[in-house]
Image: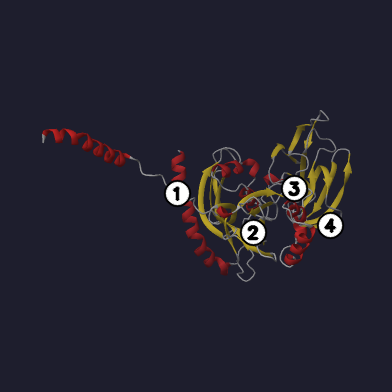
Amino acid sequence: MKRLSVLLLPVFMLLFSCNKSEKEQPDPIIPKPKPAIVEFGFKLNDFDVVNDTVVSGDTFGSILEKQNFNPSQIHNVNEAIRDTFDVRKIRVGKPYTMLRTKDASKKLQAFIYQPDRLSYYVIDLRDSVAKAYKKVRPIQIKRRTIAGALDGSLTEELERQKVDPALASKISTIYAWSIDFFKLQKGDKFAMTFTERYINDTVYDGVEDLEAAFFEYKGKLIYAFPFAQDTTSGKIQYYDEDGKVLKNLFLKAPLKFSRISSRFSRNRFHPVQQIWKAHKGTDYAAPTGTPIMTTASGVVEQTGYTAGNGNFVKVKHNSTYSTQYLHMSRIIARRGQRVSQGDVIGRVGSTGLATGPHVCYRFWKNGVQVDPLRLRLPNSEPMNAKYKPRFMAEMEPLKRELDSVAAIRFKDLK
């Protein structure tokens, strides 16, 4: 019996070893399926995807030709889709996507053209007769309130807060009559409530509307709230928290963004003539070609050129006020033309007696040249009293929201 046990021991050890080895084998790794990528209504995983951009010389036909379509096939496709997609409107720089089979033939199955970020055209080539249709991506509107203090330009501050910097231009237009943006100081505070567009809930597409704002200017908070007195016309004006219209008869400056390089003075050393003399205008330095706007509506009284003024335009606004714009590189307005406030009448230059590109802005009141930065200029038509209660009801919650967000933000800045 003892001998039998000794003989069977190696067998048991071998079996035990085999079982142990089998148990220690790692589980086989099963590759996880790739997540489905769906775009343009197609599961992209099923295709060989080629993303490209229209370049100079490309046509719809030439793109198909590179995908082994013969002239007859291209003609048939064009005829089939002509009522939905105009192949002549393909533009250089626009993106397109080709979906091809994954086999060796790489046969084109669909062509997707994107004329803009919001829409796209699909040319489906999978059947014997091509089909085309247009799709518009869904837009979501999201609301946001921000506050901050300037440490540079408004554009730079908006970029820091990941806001479309184009909002700065809208703000400058709204406040054009009440804030001289050339006089903003480092540390001046602001707050804004606005809505933004998102494509497919993820792709940022810029600012939609401004709902409320305030700006600190010369130590005072100037609020702006959009309001339509006549709800049928929907015409928007901007008012402060007391219902006073922000829009004045005159803009604060003839340029949107620039700097004052020389002010109105009774005695200034002329940089070209090298003598002391009166400077009866305000100089705004800006790059050559910058648009010059008329600061108020009126009729172009004069255009022309003189050795001192260079190319100039003079606008008569009414029996009291006139303005003149000097040293233009290009005159756009013509004599006798009626212009509206904000219309571009010329471009910044350095013609005449000028050391560099700028516009000299001159202002007449009752035939006398005066400093417009020291004038209290008249406002536009005030709000009708019957609309005031509705305005206050709409404005008050917006103002509370602005002030609340600003209080938290500015506390953090201290």
- Does 372 sit above or below residue 46? above
Q: Which residue is mark 2?
A: 119
Q: Could you tell which of marks 2 and 3 lies nearer the N-terminus?
A: 3
Q: Looking at the image, can residue 36 be seen?
A: yes
User: In the drawing, does residue 352 fall left or right of residue 1?
Assistant: right
Residue type pointed to by label 1:
Lys
| Residues marked 3 and 4 touching at CB (< 8 Å) | no
**Closer to viewer: mark 3 or mark 4:** 3
The residue carrying mark 3 is: 55
Q: Quadrant of residue 270?
A: top right
In the image, 408 versus 94, the foreground residue is 94
Say if mark 3 contacts mark 1, CB within 8 Å.
no
- Choose the circle earlier in sequence order: 2 or 4: 2
Dot 2: element: strand
Question: In the rendered image, which residue does mark 1 sit on?
Answer: 32
125 or 350: nearer the eye?
A: 125
Q: Residues within 10 Å of mark 1 (few under 14, many from 20)?
A: few
Q: Position of residue 54 (x, y in %)?
A: 72, 50
Q: Residue at x 69, y 64 (%)?
A: 130
Residue 337's label in the rendered image is 4
Locate the N terminus by quadrant.
top left
